[in-house]
Image: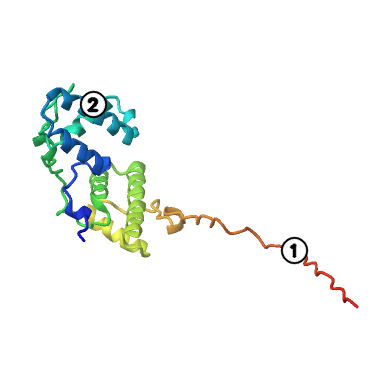
Amino acid sequence: MSYDYNTQRKRMALPEYGRNVQKMVDHIKTLQDRDERNRAAKTIIQIMGNLNPQIRDIGDFKHKLWDHLAIIADFTLDIDSPFPPPEREKLVAKPNEVPYRQGDIRFLHYGRIIELMIGAAVHLDEGKEKEYFTNLIVNQMKKSYITWNRSQVSDEVIFNDLKLLSRGRLKITEGIKILEVKDLIPPVKKKPQQGRPQGRQQNKPYNKKKVYNRH
């Protein structure tokens, strides 16, 4: 006895439409009459729309369905489509690589944003504004450190890292205060477990049936 496994079948271009739609598309490709192929294609479009009603919210959902039909047919279905088929080259083309500078970050757990903030703060004039921004930076550094490393960190470590990153140009004045961990990262509230009764259950009275002896 031979078994038919999905791994042995033809690969589906769009699995969300199922194997039956793939078979119907493969079948109409074998039809010789062009008018018959067009009628069959319109019927398949209706079936595809019923299988994926969520795409009806898209403004050009009809266009989307005809594009999907062309993809399922591997762009070899000769029919009179109301829309031009999508270009195969654009579908298989890889997206452009997003440039991201990473190698020159001094401390990964602080990230580049902290370095940019420090670079902007060092150019401020000495005074309350610079002290305010320095205070924001050190508190964000502590929050990032704890979030990344999942461990406690002393304020002295944060101050030393700030000195390194700013090359000593940001000073720790008396007005700079680092918050406690509980103030930087509030504790996560546990969700109450469902399905369990709240509070203590009261014991229901048990009425023992009287037993009468038959004489």
Residue farthest to the front?
Answer: 1
Q: Quadrant of the C terminus?
A: bottom right
Amino acid carrying mark 1 in the image: Lys
- Which quadrant of the figure has residue 144? bottom left
Label 2 secondary element: helix
Comparing labels 1 and 2, the label whose residue is closer to the camera? 2
In the rendered image of this protein, does residue 58 appear above or below residue 195?
above
Along the horizontal axis of the image, is 195 left or right of 125?
Answer: right
Label 1 secondary element: loop
Amino acid carrying mark 2 in the image: Lys
Along the horizontal axis of the image, is 95 left or right of 161?
Answer: left
Q: Is residue 131 visible?
A: yes
Measured as percent of width and height from the top left, residue 85 is found at 14, 28
The residue at the point 28 percent across, 61 percent down is 160
Residue 204 - label: 1
In the rendered image of this protein, does residue 99 appear above or below residue 67?
below
Measured as percent of width and height from the top left, residue 174 is found at 39, 53
In the rendered image of this protein, does residue 182 appear above or below residue 123?
below
Q: Is residue 124 visible?
A: no
Measured as percent of width and height from the top left, residue 103 is found at 14, 54
Along the horizontal axis of the image, is 177 left or right of 10?
Answer: right
- What residue did someone put label 2 on? 42
Quick one: 26 or 58, which is closer to the camera? Answer: 26
Q: Earlier in the sequence, mark 1 or mark 2?
A: 2
